[in-house]
Structures are given as structure tokens and as C-alpha cells.
Amino acid sequence: MPQVPSIAQLPDALISEGRYWVTSSEVAQLADMPTAHVYPGLQRLRRKGAMFSPTRGLYVVVPPEFRSWRVLPGELFIDAMMRTLGRRYYVGLLSAAAMHGAAHQAPQLFQVMVDRHVADRDIERVKLRFYTNEHLDQMPVEERPVDTGRVRVARPETTLIDLIVHPEQSGGLSNIATVIAQIGDVDVTQLARLARLRSRSVARRLGWLLARYRMDLELDPLRELALSDGQHPTRLVRTLPARGPIDSDWNLQINACVEGDL
């Protein structure tokens, strides 16, 4: 790492080396001063909008093109933040859906699945929301290159399962239906495997939606799971009363109207 003559020159020095974040202890090393002495300079950079701190001890450079934001988009710093916190993660729900082409449904929040609790936080216009997933290590993800490095993103199959598990955080089933229509290729066998980690209710709700909004897919693996026992029908919307017709193809009680925005 290059030495910097003053904390004020830190952002430019980091960018010149292709770096976008640094810890307070690294700043002390770069500036050749005790760690306790670097905080006033870092606070001045934060007030100017040249750096921000998403979590204790981590400082992220804001390049000129984002200075009006005073922060970077979530996908450009979430990996560094999670590494600093010692959490496993992936970008999920509507944030992942947007990265898979369902951009019409891009949320106002940046949604992240984590292995252990992380507190939500708002950093200027970026609103980070975290959801604990006990199955996180079993959910397929992909690493994508971004301008600042790499980011872990839920694969389409993981995204759809998580949306069904968290409908209230996904804009409701009509919003999920729109994502299903736009998200691109999905592996139904993989969907069935992931639904099995959750419950038959997830398989039933997701299968019913896929049958209506993705007629290009062969859904037998998911249907087999959905009908694999004689349980009472699952309610389409779990928070609404058990009323309405039963769809025997999915053992699902249709207790709400779903209309995707296609």
C-alpha cells in the first residue's frame, strides 16, 4: 500500500491503487501515525462526502461520480462490509431479482441474506436490510465482478425460493409473479431441491405461480414435492383466512387474487 502524506489525500491514493476501502488500522499504517490519531481526518473526509463508513472500522472511498450520493450503491461495498463483520452473505430477494433482469421490480432497499444477525442500517440513500437464513450455505449463489471487486448474488432458483419464503419483504405475490415472468432461465429440479429444505407449502405456492407465469417450464419435480403427502391444502397467502377454491394440481387454497405486471 502506498504511503500518504496526509489523511486528506487518502481517497485519491487508494483509487490510484485500484482500492476502494480500508480499515482504520491500515489508514494509520499508510499515514504513519497512531490509530487513535487518524479518526479526526477520517471524519473530515466523511463530512466532505469523500468517504463513508458502513460499519465500525471500515472506510469506503466515494469516487467523484458518486459524490452527490455520499455513498456507493450497495453491491459495490457489501462484500467488504460482510468480510469486516465476519458474516457469510449473498445479495437476495428483489435486489438479486433486479440483478437477474427483473429490473422493473428493483426495490428501494438493498436486501442481503446473512448467516447470523446483522442490524439494518441506512447510509444516505442506501437502505441496507438483512435477513437471517439458516440454510444460507446450501443456497446456490454466483460471484459477479463489480467495479470495486466481486459480490455474491443469489442464483435465480435461490432468489425465487427466498421470495416465496419472504413475501411481505418482496412486495407481495403479485410482485413476485412479475419477477417470475422476467427472471430468465431457472432449473426446476434445483427449485424442488431447495423447496425441500423449506416446506411443501413453499413448493405449492411457487409451483402455482410458475404454472401461471412461466408456461415454458416443466414443473413435474416441483409438483411431485407439492403433492407428496395428504396434508390439508396450503393457503396461497398465509396471512389471509382459509377460504376460496382448492387448486388440486398444487393442493393450494386460492384465497387471494394475484395479478403480475407483465
Image (cartoon, rainbow, N blue to C red):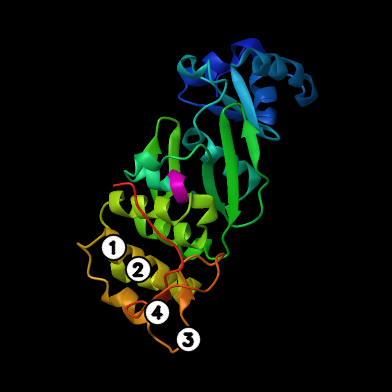
Question: Amino acid under label 4?
Answer: Asn
Q: Position of residue 184 (x, y in %)?
A: 27, 52
- Determine the secondary structure under disc 2: helix
Q: Secondary structure at mark 4?
A: loop
- Which sits earlier in the primary sequence, circle 1 or circle 3? 1
Q: Are marks 3 and 2 in contact (CB under 8 Å)?
A: no
Q: Are marks 1 and 2 in contact (CB under 8 Å)?
A: yes
Q: Answer few, some or many: residues within 10 Å of disc 4's Cα (few below 14, many 20 plus, some between 14 and 19).
A: many
- Residue 27 falls in which quadrant of the image? top right
**Image point 45% across, 42% down: which residue?**
151
Q: What is the number of the mark on residue 251?
A: 4
Residue 141 visible to the viewer = no
Q: Would residue 173 be found to the left or right of residue 190 on screen?
A: right
Q: Where on the picture, by quarter, is residue 134?
A: bottom right
Camera-side residue of 124 and 60: 124
Mark 4 touching mark 3, by CB under 8 A? yes
Mark sitting on residue 212: 1
Which residue corresponds to the image point at 68% horizontal and 15% vertical from the top-left?
47
Q: Amino acid at mark 3?
A: Gln
- The Cα atoms of the two marked residues, 1 and 2, are separated by 7 Å
Left or right: residue 234 compared with residue 51 = left
What stretch of residues is rendered in magenta? Answer: 91-95
Image quarter where the N terminus lies is top right
- Tag 4 and tag 2, C-beta contact below 8 Å: no
Dot placed on the residue nearer the N-terminal end, 4 or 3: 3
Q: Residues within 10 Å of mark 3 (few under 14, many from 20)?
A: few
- Image position of 197 (left or right of 99): right
Residue position for label 3? 231
- Image coordinates of residue 232 in percent, x first then y, are 48, 84
Q: Which residue is mark 2?
A: 208
